[in-house]
Amino acid sequence: MLSPEDRKAHNTQFWSGFKLLMRQHNTKTRRGVNWLKYPTDIKDVYLRLHCDNHGAFVFFDFQFKSPSVREIVWEQMQELKVVLEKEMGTQGIWTKDLTASEGFMFDRISWENRSFNYYHQEEWKSIYIYLKERILAFDRFYQDFKDVLILLVE
């Protein structure tokens, strides 16, 4: 197990390396990929990356306070499921009504590769490739369909 200082250094080194890789790529709209704070342009909708000893994960979270708004967005995403998964190149894991540690409810679409161990530095290149491919694929989908989602929540 890593000490808190070692874990912080490990995280910094990993994500700095990923940042360098992503500088070489642009989004569909020709902007740099902001993987740390992906611009969904919708309050309470987030794209998050996570890595640990259980794998590498991409989470697309819907955290609307209103259950009815969350339901409408979820239904719309269900209608776009085939298009999204085709662009992502793999099926997502669609999970409704999760409870965050803070107590609020949210819905999530996730993609994961559980064969990775973030704490094995020799696997970082493979993790980087996996995350990069998922982010760029997600961006191609999202730039085409974000206006539909924006209209739903306005």
Image (cartoon, helix red, strand yellow):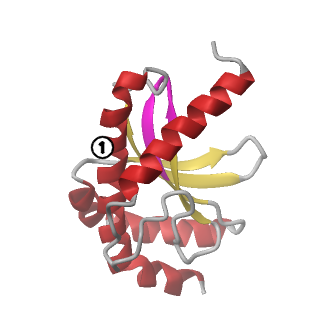
Q: Nearer the viewer, residue 43 or 78?
A: 43
Q: Quadrant of the N terminus?
A: top right
Vertical order, 141 against 85 (above or below): below
Examine the structure image and report whether residue 49 is included in the region drawn in magenta: no
- Position in image of residue 31 (x %, y %): 40, 76
Task: Identify the residue at horizontal 30%, vertical 43% (top origin).
Answer: 129
Residue 50 visible to an observer of this rendering? no
Helix, strand or loop for the magenta stretch, by majority: strand
How many numbered discs, if any?
1
Q: Is residue 76 above or below residue 14?
A: below
Q: Residues within 10 Å of mark 1 (few under 14, many from 20)?
A: some
In the rendered image of this protein, does residue 100 appear above or below residue 61? above
Q: Where does the magenta region start and end?
A: 51-59
The residue drawn where x is 44% and y is 41% is 57
Where is the C terminus found, in terms of image quarters? bottom right
Q: Is residue 90 shown above or below 11?
A: below
Residue 23 appears anywhere in the view:
yes
Would residue 25 appear left or right of 12 to someone viewing this image?
left
**Quick check: 102 left or right of 148?**
right
- Closer to the camera in the image, 34 or 44: 34
Secondary structure state at the residue bearing disc 1: helix
In the depicted view, which residue is nearer to us: 71 or 44? 44
Q: Is residue 56 magenta?
A: yes
Identify the residue at horizontal 35%, vertical 71% (top origin). Answer: 27
Question: Callout 1, which amino acid?
Answer: Ile
For disc 1, the marked residue is 129
Report the residue at 55% width, 77% height from top. Answer: 41
User: Residue 120, how many percent across, how many down?
Assistant: 43, 20
Quadrant in the rendering for residue 115: top left
